[in-house]
Amino acid sequence: MQEIKVIGLGGIGTHLIGPLCRYLESSMTETRITLIDGDSFESGNAERQDFPALGNKALVTAHRIKNLFPNLRIEAKPWYITEENAFLCIKDGDVVFLCVDNHKTRKLVCDRLSELNEALLISGGNEYADGNIQVYVRREGKDVCPPITYLHPEIETPKDRSPAEMSCEELSKSGAPQLIFTNLVAAAWMLSAFWLIINQLSGEVPYSEQYFDLKTGMARSAKR
Amino acid sequence: MAEANTGTDEKEVIVVCGANTQVLQMAGSTVGDARRRLADVMNIPPSAQALITGNAVPDDYMLREGERLEFVRPAGVKG
C-alpha cells in the first residue's frame, strides 16, 4: 500500500489535498492518506483556507475528504510533528507532502527522512507573492537529491519555533498576511513535482527546487 | 562587409534570484556590486548566498563574461 502523509492543512495543505485525492482515487494503487496537524481552523482562516467547520485541521479535513472520496483510506492525526513523534508519523516508503509554516518543522521532517531507506519529501512554502517547493528523495538508503537544508541555512539552523513549542497566545499572534493565490500556486507545484517523480520511468529527479513569483509571472526550476 | 551580429555581448553575466533572471553587462564587476545594484529590482535578501555554477563565491569575486550568478533565495516560510 502506498502511504502518503500530508503534514500541515493550512493555506497550502487545504488546496493540495483535494486534487491529490482526486488524482489518487483514479489511480490503480491502493493508498492510505494520513493528514497531520495540531492546529485548529478559526473563522479568521476563511479568507485563505478551505474548511466546512471549525476544529482541528486534520480531523475536519479528513471528514471533508472522506465524504468527497469515499473509496480512499483517509486517517487523521490531530497533533504537531515533534522530535518525539516524528519516527511514528513518518516511516520508510512514505511520500510526505510538507505544507507547514515554519522551518523548525521542515528541519525536523527532513532529518527524519534522512534516516529512511526509501522516501519522497515534497515541501512547499511561500511569502506573500512568491515561494518555492523543494524535493528530497531517498532510495536504497542514499540521497538521490540533496536534502531541503542544502543551500538553505534558514532551514538547517531554523530561528523560528514549531507550533508545538509555542503558547496559545504566541500562536494567535503569529502569522504574517498571506495571499490565497500564492498558496494555490505552491500547492500546484508540489502536486506537479509528485506527478513528475512517481511517473518518471528512469527514476531521475528532474529538479529538486522550483521557485515561483506571482508579481513577475516567472518560475524557475533548479537541480541542486 | 559588416560583421554578422552574433547576438552576444562580451560583458554579459546571467544573474538569477528565485524565479527571476536578468542578463546584464556585469563582467568585471564583483558579486557584491551585483548584490547592491540588483537588491531591490530582484528582491535579493542581504544574506543570500552567492553561487557561480553551483559553487559558493564571496562578494569580492570578480564576475567573468558568460558566468551564471545565483543568489540563493531563502525558502518560503509560510503555508
Image (cartoon, rainbow, N blue to C red):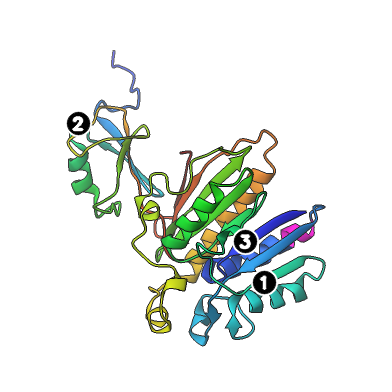
Decide: few, some or many residues near mark 2? Use Cα within 10 Å; few <14, some 14-19, many ≥20: some
Q: Give the residue number, with chain letter if any, for mark 3.
A: A88
Looking at the image, which is closer to me, A84 or A217?
A84
Q: Nearer the viewer, mark 2 or mark 1?
A: 1
Q: Name the residue type under label 2.
A: Met
Q: Quadrant of the N terminus of chain B?
A: top left
Label ID, residue A217? none
Residue A18, image x, y percentages: 67, 67
* Closer to us: B31 or A224: A224
**For residue A27, side relative to residue B55 (left or right):** right
Q: How many residues crowd mark 1 within 10 Å: few (<14), some (14–19), many (20+)?
A: many
Q: Secondary structure at mark 2?
A: loop
Main structural element of the magenta stretch: helix, strand or loop?
helix
Q: Percent position (x, y) of residue B15?
A: 31, 40
Mark 3: amino acid: Leu
Is residue A25 shown in magenta? yes
**At 24% from the left edge and 48% from the top edge, which residue is drawn?**
B38
Q: Which residue is mark 1?
A: A76
- The part of the chain drawn in magenta is A22-26
The residue where tag 2 is placed is B62
Disc 1 marks a residue whose amino acid type is: Ala
Label 2 chain ID:
B
In this rendering, the answer to whether B60 lies above or below B45 is above
